[in-house]
Image (spheres, grey):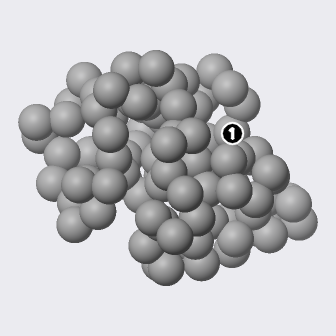
Amino acid sequence: MEISKLTKEQLVPQYLMHSYLYYIEGNPVLSDRSYDLLCIRLLAEWNEVEHPHKDIVDRESLSSGTGFYLKEEDYPRIATIAAREYFLLESEGVQ
């Protein structure tokens, strides 16, 4: 996935999905570098990003390149379902 090609509307969902896959499921799909770039971009464009789950994202954690603070129950159900589907597609080579 090319982080630079994501729209502003995709930044929060991608952050939540990839944080969930890495920290909760233990199945990272993004490289550490790509995850860092996602955090950097979301932080840089924070004021322009609108998303209903933006309040879940901690700006300080973005600056550290982490989603470790999120617990499983913090993730919206739609993010966990999307993350699992994304992982399945990636593991099957469909993406």
Q: Is residue 5 above or below residue 64?
A: below
Residue at figure coordinates x 18%, y 46% from the top left: 49
Q: If the image is split into quadrants, where does the N terminus sit?
A: top right
Residue with the most extreme right position: 92
- Is 66 placed above or below 48 here? above
Where residue 22 sits in the image (x, y, percent)?
Answer: 70, 47
Residue 7 shows in this picture: no
Can residue 58 be seen in this snapshot? yes
The 10 Å Cα crowd at callout 1, few under 14, some 14 to 19, many 20 or more, is some
Residue 26 in the image: state x and y as whole percent: 80, 51
The location of residue 89, given as percent across then percent down, is 77, 68
Q: Does 72 sit left or right of 27 as displayed?
A: left
Residue 39 appears in which quarter of the rendering? top left
The residue depicted at 26 percent of the width and 46 percent of the height is 8
Q: State the residue at coordinates (33%, 26%).
A: 60
- Which image quarter is the C terminus in? bottom right
Near-viewer residue (62 or 12): 62
Q: How many labels does the image show?
A: 1
Amino acid type, label 1: Leu
Using the image, determine if residue 43 lies above or below residue 64: below
Give the vertical position of 49 relative to 24 (above or below): above
The image quarter containing residue 4 is top left
The residue lying at 32 percent from left, 55 percent from top is 56
Residue 18 lies left or right of residue 75; in this view the side is right
Q: Position of residue 15 (x, y in %)?
A: 47, 47
* Circle 1 SS class: loop
Q: On the image, numbered disc 1 is attached to which residue?
A: 30
Furthest residue in direction left, as rendered:
47
Residue 29 or residue 71, whichever sits in front? 71
